[in-house]
């Protein structure tokens, strides 16, 4: 669906998946293998799509905290 750089060697992909009949939001770290192909690592987080609003609320709290510290 979308991706962004984590660092110079890794990126984070945000995907929608269906696993065992459940819709999941998968935030997964990808790295390049020796062939240059991007492959998923074990690092990541899967949430049910019904938890998306909880994730968005948590990000808003973090944004507010960072803004108060004048980091953002």
Image (tube, helix red, strand yellow):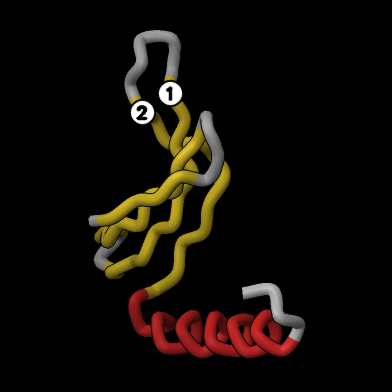
Is 60 located above or below residue 2 in the figure?
Answer: below
Between residue 22 and residue 32, name the one nearer to us.
32
- Provide the secondary structure element on which disc 1 rests: strand
- Expressed as whole percent of the image width and height from the top left, the position of residue 57 reads 51, 89
- Expressed as whole percent of the image width and height from the top left, the position of residue 9 reads 52, 29
Name the residue: 35% across, 57% down: 14
Residue 32: which numbered mark, if any? 1
Find out whether the residues at labels 1 and 2 contact each other: C-beta distance under 8 Å. Answer: yes
Query: Viewed as shown, does residue 72 lie left or right of 32?
Result: right
- Expressed as whole percent of the image width and height from the top left, the position of residue 22 reads 30, 69
- Expressed as whole percent of the image width and height from the top left, the position of residue 53 reads 41, 88
Q: Residue furthest front?
A: 70
Is 65 located above or below residue 18 in the figure?
Answer: below
Residue 38: which numbered mark, if any? 2
Is 30 located above or below residue 48 in the figure?
Answer: above
Q: Name the image quarter holding residue 37.
A: top left
Is 63 located above or below residue 4 in the figure?
Answer: below
- Quarter of the image that includes the C terminus: bottom right
Q: Residues within 10 Å of mark 1 (few under 14, many from 20)?
A: some
Name the residue: 63% across, 89% down: 64
Between residue 63 and residue 50, name the one nearer to us.
63
């Amino acid at each position: 669906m979308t991706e962004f750089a984590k660092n110079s060697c890794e990126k984070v992909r945000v995907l929608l998946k269906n696993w065992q009949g459940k819709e999941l939001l998968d935030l997964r770290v990808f790295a390049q293998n020796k062939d240059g192909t991007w492959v998923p690592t074990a690092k990541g987080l899967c949430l049910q799509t019904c938890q998306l609003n909880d994730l968005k609320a948590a990000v808003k709290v973090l944004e507010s905290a960072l803004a108060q510290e004048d980091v953002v």
